[in-house]
Amino acid sequence: TRWNDVKKAIIGFSNDPASAGIGVGIQYFPKLPAQYTSTCSNDSQCGGYGPCWLSYCRACTVTHYSTPDVPITVLPGAVAAITNSINAITPFGGTPTGPALQGAVNYAKAWASSHPGHSTVVVLATDGDPYSCAPAVWRLATYMATSARDSSVSASAACSGQQAMPNPALR
């Protein structure tokens, strides 16, 4: 599956001896408590993890993604935490790429400001198409470029979704 390819790449990078000394953290999207991962029929069923869109809570708020599942830790010290974290995740649908990227960049900026002299990069690795929350995918490139210009944080994306652009009807 696409998810298995993403997992294999992240775990492989983390275990590669050439990655030693690089700080790595990880977060997932969508990031929902278990009670919100089943289907919904309206926004009120999603609590603070809405909206309900196409029968799933989408967790479209940036703050849901501003704290990583595994904080930035230097490799190889982070290998076990990254591997255990990624092996515990089961994707269930929805790809709130915009809020997830913004949350990751917010965390990275805070980390970079407390670790001067380090280069900080956000890598967005996704197995899905970025269409369930705003901003739309074509606005993400602008956001990534602006974040890189305005701070010590740069961003890059690695996507294995099926579409290069979301459905035009969702614009």
Image (cartoon, helix red, strand yellow):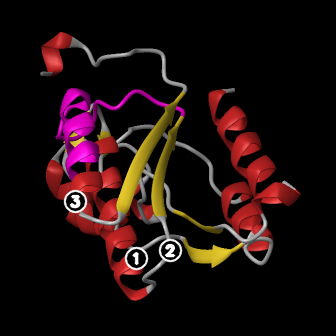
Residue at coordinates 30% horizontally, 47% vertically from top-left?
58
Which one is closest to the eye, mark 2 or mark 1?
Answer: 2
Q: Is residue 43 magenta?
A: no
Mark 2 residue type:
His
State the separation of the CA atoms marked 2 and 3: 28 Å
**Residue annotated with mark 1:** 112
Dots 2, 1 in contact, CB < 8 A: yes
Dots 2, 3 in contact, CB < 8 A: no
Q: Which residues are magenta?
A: 127-146
- Image quadrant where residue 55 sits: top left
- Image quadrant where residue 16 sits: bottom right
State the separation of the CA atoms marked 2 and 1: 7 Å
Question: Can residue 60 be seen in the rendering of this structure?
Answer: no
Which quadrant of the rendered structure holds the N terminus?
top right
Where in the figure is residue 36, as x and y percent of width and height? Answer: 38, 57
**Residue annotated with mark 2:** 118
Residue 13's label in the rendered image is none
Looking at this view, is 93 or 45 the one in front?
Answer: 93
N-term mark: 1 or 3: 3
State the separation of the CA atoms marked 1 and 3: 22 Å
Q: Could you say whether the residue bearing mark 3 is in a helix, strand or loop?
A: loop
Q: Could you say whether the residue bearing mark 1 is in a helix, strand or loop?
A: helix
Q: Residue furthest right?
A: 17
Picture layout, residue 110 above or below residue 85: below
From the viewer's perspective, tell me whether residue 24 is left or right of residue 150: right
**Residue annotated with mark 3:** 61
Other-residue count near label 2 (Cα within 10 Å), few / some / many at <14 / 14–19 / ≥20: some
From the viewer's perspective, tell me whether residue 29 is left or right of residue 10: left
